[in-house]
C-alpha cells in the first residue's frame, strides 16, 4: 500500500472533546476530590442521573478508570472506588522509593538544560497549587512535576514502571495532600529535588526523592489510623 493510501485510511478526525472524555474527566475528578471516597459503590443508574448521560457512556468511563487503578470491579458486586489498604500502601511506597530515587538520579545526569528549566517551571506551578488551590489542582500539578521528572530521566522502561502504579499512587496522594499540614512540607521536599538536579548532583537528587517518598508515606499511612 502506498504512503498516500495509508494517509487516507489512517487519518484521525480531530475533535475538541468527546462526550466520553468529558464523562471520564468528571468521574476522575470526583474520585480525586474525594467526593467519591475509596470503597464507595459506583452504581451506573445513579451516575447516569448525576452526570446526565447514558449508561453506555458511564460504563466506558468506568472501564477506563478501572484500567487506571482508580476503580475496582468485583463480580456480582459491581464497580466501586478502589481501596488501597495499609499493606498495599507500604508495598507501593517501597516501590516508589526505589523507582523515583532512580528517576531523580538519572534526571540529574541525563536531563537536558531545557528539561531542568521545565522542572523548575513545574515547581512554580506546584507551589501555587499547594498554597492556594484545591485537592484536584494540587494532584494535577504534582502529577505534572513527576511527568517531567520521568521523561527527563531518559529511561522509558523506568517511566513505564512508575506509570503502572499511577492509579493507586493518585489515591494515596489524595490522602496525603488532603492533610492540611502536608502542603508546605511537601514543597520543601520537592524544591530539594529541583535544587539537586539543577546542580547536576545525582546522589543528592536520589536522596531528595527518597526523602520525599518517605514523608509522603508517613502522611498517607497516618490516615489509616484516624
Image: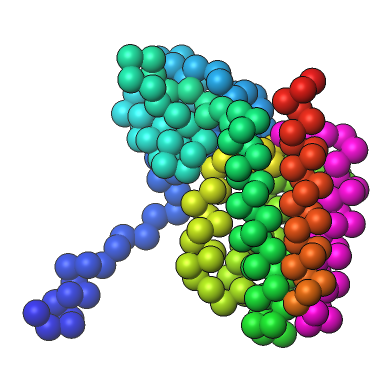
Kindly indicate the quadrant of the structure image that contains residue 125: bottom right
Residue 98 position in % (x across, y down):
64, 59
Q: Is residue 177 magenta?
A: yes
Which of the 4 quarters of the picture holds residue 76? top left
Q: Is residue 8 left or right of residue 152?
A: left
* Apparent side of residue 37 relative to residue 131 in the rendered image (left or right): left
Taking depth in this image into account, of 188 and 217 the one nearest to the observer is 217
Residue 22 appears in view: no
Quadrant of the rendered structure where residue 92 is?
top right
Q: In the depicted view, which residue is nearer to us: 24 or 98?
A: 98
**Which quadrant of the figure contains the N terminus?**
bottom left
Give the percent coordinates (x, y) of residue 10.
Answer: 22, 67
Image quarter in which the C terminus is found: top right
Tell me where residue 55 appears, x and y as whole percent: 34, 23
User: Is 51 placed left or right of 218 in the picture?
Assistant: left
- Per the rendered image, the range of residues in magenta is 175-201
Work out whether 220 lies above or below 97. Answer: above
Front residue of this view, candidates 7 and 153:
153
Judge whether residue 158 is colored magenta: no
> Residue at (53%, 66%) from the top-left corner?
158
User: Is residue 177 depicted above or below 112 in this figure?
Assistant: above
Placement of 11 over or under 4, stated as above or below: above
Amino acid at each position: 500500500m502506498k504512503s498516500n493510501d495509508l494517509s487516507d485510511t489512517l487519518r484521525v478526525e480531530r475533535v475538541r472533546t468527546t462526550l466520553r472524555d468529558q464523562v471520564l474527566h468528571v468521574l476522575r475528578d470526583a474520585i480525586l476530590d474525594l467526593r467519591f471516597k475509596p470503597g464507595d459503590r459506583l452504581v451506573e443508574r445513579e451516575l447516569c442521573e448525576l452526570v446526565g448521560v447514558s449508561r453506555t457512556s458511564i460504563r466506558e468511563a468506568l472501564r477506563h478508570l478501572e484500567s487506571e487503578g482508580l476503580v475496582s470491579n468485583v463480580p456480582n458486586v459491581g464497580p466501586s472506588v478502589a481501596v488501597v489498604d495499609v499493606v498495599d500502601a507500604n508495598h507501593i511506597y517501597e516501590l516508589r522509593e526505589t523507582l523515583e530515587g532512580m528517576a531523580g538520579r538519572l534526571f540529574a545526569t541525563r536531563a537536558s538544560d531545557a528539561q531542568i528549566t521545565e522542572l523548575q517551571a513545574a515547581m512554580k506551578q506546584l507551589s501555587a497549587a499547594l498554597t492556594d488551590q484545591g485537592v484536584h489542582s494540587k494532584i494535577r500539578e504534582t502529577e505534572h512535576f513527576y511527568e517531567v521528572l520521568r521523561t527527563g530521566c531518559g529511561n522509558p522502561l523506568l517511566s513505564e514502571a512508575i506509570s503502572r502504579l499511577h492509579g493507586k499512587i493518585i489515591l494515596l496522594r489524595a490522602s496525603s495532600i488532603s492533610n492540611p499540614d502536608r502542603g508546605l512540607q511537601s514543597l520543601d521536599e520537592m524544591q530539594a529535588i529541583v535544587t539537586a538536579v539543577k546542580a547536576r548532583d545525582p546522589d543528592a537528587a536520589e536522596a531528595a526523592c527518597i526523602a520525599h517518598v518517605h514523608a509522603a508515606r508517613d502522611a498517607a499511612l497516618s490516615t489509616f489510623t484516624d
